[in-house]
Structures are given as structure tokens and as C-alpha cells.
Image (cartoon, rainbow, N blue to C red):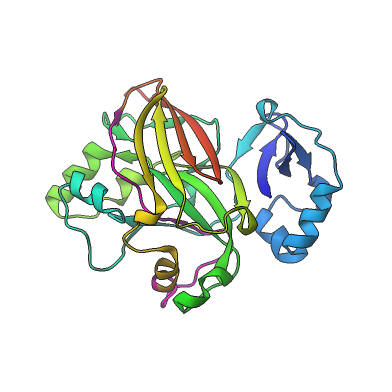
């Protein structure tokens, strides 16, 4: 099941939908626009039956997409979690997971523009599989990792590379280079766990105006999802709707104004966003 959050018009309220037979089934009457909360209250089987009993009433191309999570307290991002990406960055593969955060205010939806602020002239794409946390999670052993997961989505970890490299050179935090508004496009949907039986065997690709720039497989992660959930929840509470962006693959490259990015995770979805550079 693929659950999304949309508006029928830019000023309309957000409503929950499910993708079915090429169209969107409205779930607005179920009382929430939060797919994670609805999965928790209804359960996957009951909600799947509810979706199957309804007819699609909306066209994907005619709606405005919001991020697929209604409540997100933090976006946990993993750096250098693919060997080839570490090598292209001139960095060593870390012995432990390397975490940084994006603020929830960086989230934006499918088909929304990514707007680079005037202070940067070098923007880069980073396609990633994101885990959507489904329950309050703390100190969860790696072997029980699935208990924490509501589903998966696609994230494009946008980075103002010029600003990041300056701060790396100064040996100061570089979170701001990744935390601007619209720098965490996500979606289009939350793919529930039944749609992704093995998240460690998914092809990732990113295209810019039809040119493939990134391609690899999640099986190439240095630290897999069980380890990441165990590590992140060790002393830190993961909340429903939080995202874990599991790291990008090799092929990062600069973008220019007007470029259209297509970030795809096999079995999860294709996230499309166009780049806009803001003038000073």
C-alpha cells in the first residue's frame, strides 16, 4: 500500500490518500491526514481492506503533494554509508555510523521546487532510501528492528556543497548546508512494509533531465537498517513519523537552475523535483 498526503488545490486542506489502480483513493473521512497514526490505529490489514473497498477518485497529476509524514520531529541522516560515495568524497569509510540531522522544516513534497538560497551557488543531489518510524522507539536491539518501521519513502538529501566544504575546512558543523527550506524533498508516498519485504535489495537511481547520475543498490550499505535503528535508538528516542535517511550513493554532481531531478528507489517510488536558484 502506498499512502500519500495531498491537497486538491494549493489552498485546500491536506488529506490522506492511497494509490490504487493508477488513481488516488481518498481516506479523508477516516479523520486524520497522518498515515503513520492511521497505520497504528487501524493496522496494516484493516487499512488495506479499507482501501480495497474504495474507488479511486483523484488523478496523481491533478493534486499537490505534501511530504508523506504529517509529524516529524527529526530527520536522521547517515553520512558515508556507501563505500563508493566515501571514496568519491575523499573520505575514509567510517568504523561506526555517522549521524547528522536535517530539521523537519526542510521537508517538501513530490513535484515541489527545491529552492537554493542566494548564499549558495553549488547545489548537489543525493538520492536515498528513508525509513519511516512507526512507533516510539528507544534502545531497540538490531534483531527487532522491524518493530520500529511503519514503511519507507524516497528522500533527496539536497546539499549546498560549497557551504559544506567551507565549514569542513574550518572544522565546524556543516548542518546548515543541508538544512535549508526544501532541502529534504520526500515522497511521493509512504510505502508500507508489505510493499518492501527486503529493504536491503533495492535499486537506487537519480536522473537529471534524463541523464542517470547515481545508480547503486541498498545491499551496498556499509551499515544496514537493523544496525542503524539499533544505533540511533541507543539513548535517543525515535518518534512516529521520524525519518532515517540511510545514506547516498556515488554520483553526486552539481545542479543548475531549472534542472529536474528524478530520484527513484525500487519498489518505493519516484520523487520528482525541479531546482530553482534564488537571486541575491
Query: Residue drawn at (41%, 78%), measured in percent from left and top?
Result: 235
- Where residue 198 sits: x, y (%)? 52, 58
Instruction: Locate residue 136 relative to residue 27 in the image: left or right.
Output: left
- Where residue 193 sits: x, y (%)? 61, 58
In the rendered structure, which segment of residues is drawn in magenta? 231-254
24 or 32: which is nearer to us?
A: 24
Query: Residue drawn at (39%, 72%), measured in percent from left and top?
Result: 231
Number of marks present in the image shown:
0
105 or 162: which is nearer to us?
A: 162
Q: Main secondary structure of the magenta part?
A: loop
Q: Looking at the image, is 144 positioned above or below residue 50? A: below
244 or 13: which is nearer to us?
A: 244
- Where residue 62 sits: x, y (%)? 69, 26
Quadrant the C terminus occupies = top left
The image quadrant that residue 229 belongs to is: bottom left
Instruction: Locate residue 33 relative to residue 129 in the image: left or right.
Output: right
Q: Looking at the image, is 121 positioned above or below residue 265? A: above
Amino acid at each position: 500500500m502506498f499512502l500519500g498526503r495531498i491537497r486538491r488545490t494549493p489552498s485546500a486542506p491536506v488529506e490522506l490518500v492511497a494509490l490504487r489502480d493508477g488513481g488516488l483513493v481518498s481516506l479523508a473521512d477516516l479523520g486524520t491526514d497522518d498515515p503513520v497514526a492511521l497505520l497504528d490505529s487501524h493496522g496494516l490489514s484493516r487499512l488495506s481492506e479499507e482501501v480495497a473497498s474504495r474507488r479511486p477518485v483523484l488523478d496523481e497529476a491533478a493534486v499537490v503533494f505534501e511530504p508523506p509524514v504529517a509529524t516529524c520531529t527529526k530527520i536522521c541522516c547517515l553520512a558515508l554509508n556507501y563505500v563508493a560515495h566515501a571514496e568519491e568524497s575523499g573520505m575514509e569509510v567510517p568504523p561506526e555510523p555517522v549521524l547528522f540531522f536535517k530539521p523537519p522544516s526542510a521537508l517538501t513534497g513530490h513535484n515541489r521546487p527545491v529552492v537554493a538560497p542566494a548564499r549558495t551557488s553549488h547545489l548537489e543531489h543525493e538520492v536515498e532510501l528513508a525509513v519511516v518510524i512507526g512507533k516510539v522507539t528507544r534502545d531497540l536491539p538490531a534483531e527487532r528492528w522491524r518493530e520500529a518501521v511503519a514503511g519507507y519513502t524516497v528522500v533527496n538529501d539536497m546539499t549546498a556543497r560549497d557551504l559544506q566544504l567551507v565549514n569542513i575546512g574550518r572544522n565546524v558543523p556543516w548542518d546548515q548546508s543541508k538544512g535549508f527550506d526544501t532541502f529534504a524533498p520526500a515522497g511521493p508516498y509512504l510505502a508500507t512494509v508489505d510493499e518492501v519485504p527486503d529493504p536491503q535489495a533495492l535499486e537506487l537511481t537519480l536522473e537529471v533531465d534524463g541523464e542517470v547520475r547515481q545508480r547503486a543498490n541498498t545491499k551496498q550499505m556499509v551499515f544496514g537498517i537493523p544496525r542503524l535503528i539499533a544505533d540511533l535508538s541507543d539513548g535517543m528516542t525515535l518518534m512516529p513519523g521520524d525519518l532515517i535517511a540511510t545514506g547516498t550513493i556515488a554520483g553526486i554532481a552539481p545542479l543548475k537552475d531549472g534542472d529536474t531531478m528524478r530520484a527513484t528507489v525500487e519498489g518505493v517510488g519516484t520523487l520528482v523535483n525541479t531546482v530553482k536558484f534564488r537571486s541575491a
